[in-house]
Image: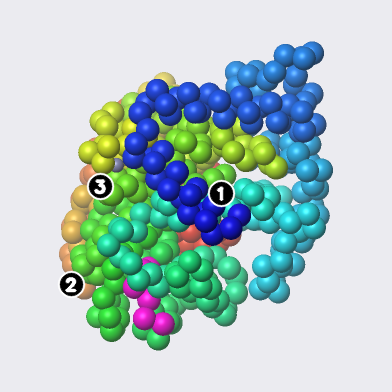
Amino acid sequence: MNLLSKIITVKRLDHHFYRWDEATLRAHQAKRVAAVLEYAGRHSPYYRKLRSGKSPLTLDSVPRIDKAEMMAHFDRINTAGLKKNELIEFQLKQDRAGSLGLFPGGFSAGVSSGTSGNKGLTVLSRTERELYSCLLWARNGIPAVVKDRRVLFALRTNNPAFMEVASFGVKICYVDYTHPAEDLVKIINSRNLNILAGPPSLLAMIARLHASIDHPVDVVISYAEVLSEKTRQEIGSAFGAPVVEIYQSSEGFIGSTCRAGKLHLNEDVILVDLEETPDTLGKARNVVVTDLYRTTQPVIRYALNDILEISPERCSCGSCFQVISRIHGRSDDIFHLKGPGGQVRYLFPDYVQRAIIHASDEIVEYQAIQHSIDAIEVRLVLKDGADGPAIEQAVRANLAGWAEKVGGKPGVITFTGALPEPNPVSRKFIRVVRKF
Ligand SMILES: [Zn+2]
């Protein structure tokens, strides 16, 4: 794809986002779903086997799959005859060498973290990578007024060196997000970076050092972890800059921030199906996605581990794409509580989070870990001089209150004094964790 066709694609993506009406969007989705199913039915051994006779596949006729299924059947799901083990081995070798080489055939592989045997694998062809980069260009949420773009892009690269790339007049400095925040501030200053992109836990650490940054930051982009309203406000006011959010997973670029500051589903590239959950207090939904363009590794009725709430209102920006009002976290982290008569009641991560942050303004960092159905550990970092025992009492009472709302019992709540810590495998900072 040359620069001109990229610019045209970006303009078209912008048009879809802001100008399409509901009927145009739904017709486009139906057409793309049919195209993806038709391709998979012909070229993917896994989907070909599901076809009966000559009739085409329909969305209802293919199984809903998850990460474990995708990985178990990867070699038969992909349409390019690629082997999972060869790709993972190739990619890990590339990562260790800090190189960006492609797999024979021009494929790029992304290996997402997971315990051994539970790694995710994403394969993109050259065309799919180009569409992805156009999407990121069109929908990165950076306000149009920010013309000069020098980006700190914090990723988990496992590489101590940082890498500088310039393309389309944008300078991007890739750094490993496990670097101490002080080192990142030095890079921000020496390269005069005005856009900071990273997981919110890291952005919050940089925000606490904002006084050491010697130039203005124009926009902050958050991704990879749940961004709470509290963290958004802290980061935004430290830098005096807008905080926009990108919602992406290894399965695709699912949501991006519009010019009105709301997070929309990218419904022209991903069909999102929202499934009921046992949330009795709000409208939390499980997310099942179908990628409308990927064909090398078809993503069809794929259940993410994420829980979302969708706003019933249409956004003031004019887009008919649905607005995500809340990202709860991972479905694996829903707390399981003892309910009446041996039943299990579910307390969703966002409620646990609210129980803690609403207890006091003096809480700087926190993490809640459920170790068993009747044991919750809470880790708190408080501002200097805060009244620890009173705050712990308030957190305890709030958690008990939320547990009662769902008809469950929180069990024993302990405050261990341990520091909140990132997931040892993914290094993501997950504030509400269920460990059993
Ligand atoms: Zn909007």
**Frontmost residue, 166 versus 314:** 166
Measuring 70% from the left and 31% from the top, which residue is drawn there? 39
Foreground mark, 3 or 2, reads 3
For label 2, the residue is 385
**In the shown orientation, is residue 121 left or right of residue 172?**
right
Q: Earlier in the sequence, mark 3 or mark 2?
A: 3
Amino acid type shown at disc 3: Ala
SS at badge 2: loop
Measuring 51% from the left and 68% from the top, which residue is drawn there? 167
**Separation of marks 3 and 1 at Cα, in angstroms:** 24 Å
Residue 35 percent across, percent down from the top left: 63, 28
Q: How crowded is the residue under tag 3: few (<14 C-alpha within 10 Å), some, or many (20+)?
A: few
Quarter assignment of residue 222: bottom left
Quarter assignment of residue 158: bottom right
The magenta segment is 191-196
**Which scheme is used to colour this image of the protein?**
rainbow
For label 1, the residue is 131
Count of numbered labels shown in the rendering: 3
Residue 194 percent across, percent down from the top left: 34, 73
Foreground mark, 2 or 1, reads 1
Residue 125 percent across, percent down from the top left: 68, 50
**In the shown orientation, is residue 235 left or right of residue 127?**
left
**In the shown orientation, is residue 201 left or right of residue 159?**
left
For label 3, the residue is 260
Residue 214 vs 413, above or below: the answer is below
Q: How crowded is the residue under tag 1: few (<14 C-alpha within 10 Å), some, or many (20+)?
A: some
Q: How crowded is the residue under tag 2: few (<14 C-alpha within 10 Å), some, or many (20+)?
A: few
**Separation of marks 2 and 1 at Cα, in angstroms:** 52 Å
Name the dominant secondary structure of the magenta segment: loop
Tell whether position 223 is magenta: no
Measuring 30% from the left and 33% from the top, which residue is drawn there? 311
Amino acid type shown at disc 1: Leu
